[in-house]
Image: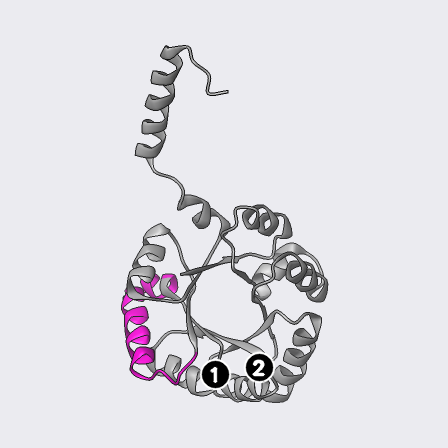
Amino acid sequence: MKFFVDTADIAEIRALASLGMVDGVTTNPSLIAKSGRKIAEVIAEICAAIPGPVSAEVTATDLDGMLKEGRFLKSIAPNVAVKVPLTMEGLRACRALADDGAMVNVTLCFSPAQALLAAKAGAAFVSPFVGRLDDVGHDGMGLIRDIVTIYRNYPALRTEVLVASVRHPVHVVEAAKLGAHVATLPPAVLRALFAHPLTDKGLAAFLADWAKTGQSIL
């Protein structure tokens, strides 16, 4: 499974990239707004720091507007993935941008039918939002299971399942078990993957035993 980091904070991105475990980045208008900077500047800086896909989202909702914004975003760097909403106009934009050679991330997916349409429209990624479904009493991981099953039935579909709205490490593990291609994680969730109390306890015991020997490895 590939890990994308879900933030527009360049300091966080660089810190997490230093771990060697970040394969890409996702952003959205809310994350860009928190940065307080111009979108082109932020996306260019992230793309320079991360060689993998960097999702940058359009804000237009009509086809012409999405195409103009999408082509501008694509021009910032070759690793930009243009992010469009899963609407009829968004899917039309996806097809046109994909035909132009752009990577497209179709976002705000909440049903298997929508995911199938995104794949047929040529999306490089589809982003089902598991946490938001869980929040309203639906089974977010059930959606991932259905999408992965459908895509496996049709090998000609090349769209990758990018699990979004990830709230905790269990979401990541369950998505990996189901065979999702990518999880996009807030920095706090990515760091939480490292944590386990038994690891800390075991390390403390090993170090205490070693200290009793009075030895040094070097």
Q: Magenta segment: does it hold 198?
A: no
The vertical placement of 116 against 191, above or below, is below
Task: Name the mark on residue 176.
Answer: none
The vertical placement of 214 against 173, above or below, is above
Distance in Å between CA atoms under marks 2 and 1: 9 Å
**Is residue 105 found left or right of 37 in the rendered image?**
left
Name which residue type carries label 1.
Thr
Q: Picture coordinates of residue 215 (x, y %)?
A: 43, 13
Q: Picture coordinates of residue 77 (x, y %)?
A: 68, 70
Name which residue type carries label 2.
Thr
- Are dots 2 and 1 in contact, CB under 8 Å? yes
At a point 41% along the width and 10% down the height, the residue shown is 214
At a point 61% along the width and 49% down the height, the residue shown is 14
Task: Find disc 2 in the rendering and name its residue.
Answer: 61
Question: Of residues 102 and 55, which is closer to you in this image?
Answer: 102
At a point 60% along the width and 62% down the height, the residue shown is 51
Q: Magenta segment: does it hold 150?
A: yes
Asked where in the image residue 63 lies, by quadrant, the reply is: bottom right
Task: Name the mark on residue 87.
Answer: 1
Label 1 crowd bin: few (<14), some (14–19), many (20+), radius 10 Å? some
Q: Which residues are magenta?
A: 131-158
